[in-house]
Amino acid sequence: MVLVYVESPKGKLKKAAFEAVTYGKKMAESMGDTCVALTLGTVENAAQLGKYGAAKVFNVSNAEFANFDSQVYTKAIADAAIQLGAKTIILCHSSTGKSVAGRLAARFDAASVTGANALPDVSNGCKIKKSVFSGKAIAEFALRTEMKVISLMGNSMQPEISGAEVEITPLSMNVAAGRIKVKSVKTQEGTVPLPEAELVVSAGRGLKGPENWGMVEELAKAMNATTACSRPVADAHWRPHHEHVGQTGVAIRPNLYIAIGISGAIQHLAGVNNSKVIVVINKDAEAPFFKAADYGVVGDAFEIVPRLTEAYRKFKASQH
């Protein structure tokens, strides 16, 4: 059995949850097995996980899951895997998944691959590929233990509807009290989180100051995209740190990444080079970013970006 732990921040399911269940379902099919989903705490609309391939959806209800504690979550997921007889555990490669994956692997003495971006090859054992060296190479890992723990990189698997909603089955277990006391939680509201974003508009020092970010936000708003920035911009407090993408920030893999006024230092490329399409706008024709770009525009961003926004709005209007 393949067990997919589904994250539900504030009791709501996000795209990453459907990606993980789709991945688990496809992996289970390749092994002639069954995929089930596990939710912790109070979750809205958990039944719809069945539409993405979960044969059953189990829920453990307990107040201890209101705030994340890696030890409490690890024990609950491990106990669920034991109760259900699961031999593969799938997680999202999020901050939660990263905190839990290692603990689960140690608990079960299991082989583990974190940040997988492709379905495993089970024709001869179980082999999984993932990006390494900041996306410059792809490594293949052989998982030789009976128990396996895998975390899925965001935006690696397109959610696919393949079934119907299922009933939620309560799962009973003893949930120990956490040792971490959470005093407050602050999260960004109103935008798609960068790890889940399919469209990202990013800008760097080429914008000269925070007062010029309006045109970037206008383009992002027109495209329904998430905004991002380079590290120098975040360090200068032009933009909030949660928008910083790169090796020391958030690693993303959107379908489209538009970089405006960013030179393309290796540290920045390390966090965005898994993007499916990269568009670079820079007045410096020698900017390193152009070497990684699928499309490049050499010119003044202050002229190009407003024209691009207007062109996109006209295109969008013509589609209605």
Image: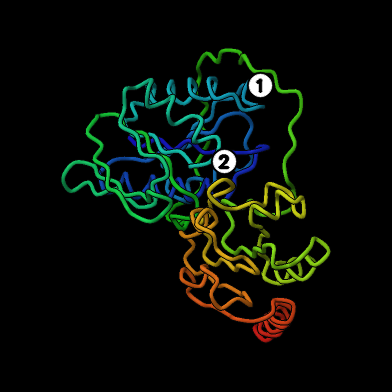
The type of residue carrying mark 1 is Ala
The type of residue carrying mark 2 is Ala
> Mark 1 or mark 2, which is nearer to you?
1
Image quadrant assignment for residue 304 = bottom right
Report crowding for label 1: few under 14, some 14 to 19, many 20 or more residues within 10 A (C-alpha).
few
In the image, residue 36 lies at what x, y percent?
41, 38
Which numbered tag is attached to residue 63? 1
Considering every residue shown, the one lying at the far right of the view is 211
Q: How many marks?
A: 2
Q: Of the two numbered discs 1 and 2 on the same chain, state the one appearing first in sequence.
A: 2
- From the image, which quarter does the N terminus lie in? top left
The front one of 104 and 206 is: 206
Q: Is residue 275 above or below residue 181?
A: below
Marks 1 and 2, how far apart in space?
18 Å
The front one of 18 and 157 is: 157
Q: Is residue 308 above or below residue 241?
A: below
In the image, residue 237 lies at what x, y percent?
77, 50
In the image, residue 66 lies at what x, y percent?
66, 27
Q: Residue at x 53, y 75 (%)?
A: 286
Image quadrant assignment for residue 106 = top left
Considering every residue shown, the one lying at the far left of the view is 124
Element class at badge 2: helix
In the rendered image, which residue does mark 2 sit on? 46
Report crowding for label 2: few under 14, some 14 to 19, many 20 or more residues within 10 A (C-alpha).
many
Element class at badge 1: helix
The answer to whether 105 appears left or right of 262 in the picture is left
Q: Residue at x 75, y 53 (%)?
A: 239
Q: Is residue 11 above or below residue 216?
A: above
Image quadrant assignment for residue 108 = top left
Q: Residue at x 47, y 60 (%)?
A: 273
The front one of 216 and 87 is: 216
